[in-house]
Amino acid sequence: RGSKGLWRDLTAYWILGLCNNYGYVVMLSAAHDIIKQFNPTDEAEESSSGRNCHLVSTGAILLADVLPSLFVKMLMPFFPFWVNFRIALAVAFSAAGFLLVGFANAEWMALLGVIITSASSGIGETTFLAYSSNYNKNVISTWSSGTGGAGVIGSLSYASLRSLDVSPRDTMLIMLIFPAIEAFAFWLLLRRPEVDILPQVTTGDSTKELISDEKPLVGFKEKLHYIKHLFKYMVPLCLVYFFEYFINQGLFELVYFENSFLDKSAQYRWLNVDYQIGVFISRSSVNVFQLNRIWLMSIFQFVNVVYFLTEVIWWYTPSIWIVFTIVLWEGLLGGGAYVNTFYRMSKEISPERQKFAMAMVVQSDSYGIALAGFLAIPVHNAICGLPAASRSVVW
């Protein structure tokens, strides 16, 4: 495709990344409030040890937010690629999710809204990434930046509206503008590809970088056999997200500084904003800085797990600003692993196989997140049962 009008594709993919992940991020940012709304006795039950924590972990919201998405991502690569139908479904589910959470009068209704939002995100991510094989490879960069932007804008808009005492219901209704923007970006801003089906003709420039003799994958058996070639992308990405979300949904809520300028709920919300800023910076950086050794990021993320696990048990960090710095670093690692994985794939995998490969590898972060959600719940509740800690050193 020529460069004339390329700005439309790049801008559209940034907006699509933003809108696709926005609902997912908002539901995680709202996790603490959703639990509190339907479990008002939690504050009184706080835990016999005296630790100030909800006995229902935000990991429960994480599971509702990621399992439907994972289920959808697992099925999508094997279904017909009806792009307009898929995106219409994603937009409709996104709007329905906000409405259900906003008007929920029971916990099951709120969780159903989270589940539908998750399914929307899964449909969108597999479809948009697979569809990107028809466009300039830099749409991967703008898509990743947009998903990072969703983190910042989603968590920041939720935290800000709640700080201004806007009700949870009105907050969700305001956010209905994002499914509408997603529809505009896909059907009006994004140019239609010249070739909507594979195989795709590559330019002379990209042929040097891509393995051009690979044939398109045909049939379920051939696709299944090809998956083992994708493990080098899938395993490191899965590990990074496992460690990352174990911290975010199992341990964030237990990080508490008593004499801070922020109360407990606000600390949780603003730590999420801080994390999302890190994700946005790194997901927007691939055209400036590339790192092929994704496994390095999984090691660094494991070190973060060790820090947060020991911090929430013993409360030894003297200042909340140290925690904010480490959370920013955690976000940089997570976003960097995501964007570098897909950017590498756009260069290393032939266009004939990119649609399927992208749709498969995009599952890996969800595997890690789902495992983190399952582990976060018992670990969170076990720490809640420990004797209350106190900070001996405070800056």
Image (cartoon, rainbow, N blue to C red):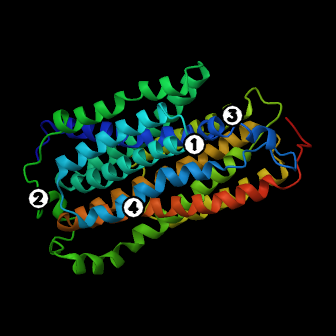
Please tell me in which quadrant of the rendered image residue 300 appears.
bottom right
* CA gap, disc 1 and disc 4: 26 Å
Give whichever of 67, 389 is nearer the camera. 67
Residue beneath disc 3: 265
| Comes first in the chain, label 1 or label 2 | 2
Q: Residue at x 49, y 50 (%)?
A: 65
Other-residue count near label 3 (Cα within 10 Å), few / some / many at <14 / 14–19 / ≥20: some
What quarter of the picture does the C terminus occupy? top right
Asked whether the viewer can see residue 281, the reply is: no
Instruction: Identify whether 364 is placed above or below 255.
Output: below
- Tag 1–tag 4 contact (CB < 8 Å): no
Is residue 221 rendered to the left or right of residue 17?
Answer: left
Check contact, mark 2 vs mark 4: CB within 8 A: no
Q: Is the residue 304 above or below the residue 145 in the image? A: below
Rounded to the nearest angstrom, the CA distance separating label 4 from label 3 is 31 Å
Q: Provide the residue designation for mark 2.
A: 197
Q: Find residue 275 and name its label.
A: 1
N-terminal of the two: label 4 or label 3? 4
Say whether disc 1 or disc 4 marks the residue closer to the N-terminus: 4
The amino acid on which the numbered mark 3 sits, given as a three-letter code, is Ser
